[in-house]
Amino acid sequence: MTQIKVVQFGFGPRGIQSVRPVLCQPGLKLVGAVEIDPGRAGNDLGELFEHPQHRRIVFCDQSEKVIFTSEPKPEVVLLI
């Protein structure tokens, strides 16, 4: 099955709620996380959600880096 690659912008209360379905849907794959909070930049997304399978997705504070230079390339951006 092909998965749609998703990047989430923002991980405040609404952002966290909007990304939860992405983490649970087999047809969606979270490939990036953009967060301007300097306290989160560089931290692992798996720690926030306590899901070992989401390790290696690191919060980044540079949206252009996540969208244009990361691999795999995202196909959808969630912006809350």
Image (cartoon, rainbow, N blue to C red):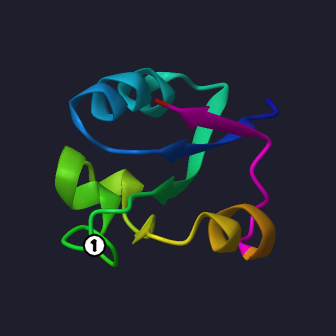
* Quarter of image, res 38: bottom left
Residue located at (67% from left, 25% from top): 27
Nearer to me, 76 or 24: 76
Dominant secondary-structure state across the stretch colored magenta: loop
Q: Which residue is mark 1?
A: 43
Nearer to me, 20 or 53: 20
Q: Quadrant of the N terminus?
A: top right
The image position of residue 36, as x and y in percent, is 37, 62
Q: Which residues are magenta?
A: 70-79
Is 57 positioned to the left or the right of 30 in the image?
A: left
Residue located at (39% from left, 54% from top): 54
The image position of residue 25, as x and y in percent, is 53, 22
Query: Does the segment drawn in magenta span residue 37?
Result: no
Say if 17 sits above or below 40 in the image.
Answer: above
Nearer to me, 47 or 38: 38
Secondary structure beneath dot 1 equals loop
Is 73 positioned to the left or the right of 24 in the image?
A: right
Amino acid at the residue labelled 1: Asn
Query: Does the segment drawn in magenta span residue 74?
Result: yes
Residue located at (45% from left, 70% from top): 61
Structural crowding at the residue carrying mark 1, measured as other residues with C-alpha within 10 Å and reported as few (<14), some (14–19) or many (≥20):
some
Residue located at (58% from left, 33% from top): 78
Total labels drawn: 1
Say if 15 sits above or below 17 in the image.
Answer: below
Is 63 positioned to the left or the right of 15 in the image?
A: right
The image position of residue 32, as x and y in percent, is 55, 57
Is 24 positioned to the left or the right of 69 in the image?
A: left
The image position of residue 74, as x and y in percent, is 74, 50
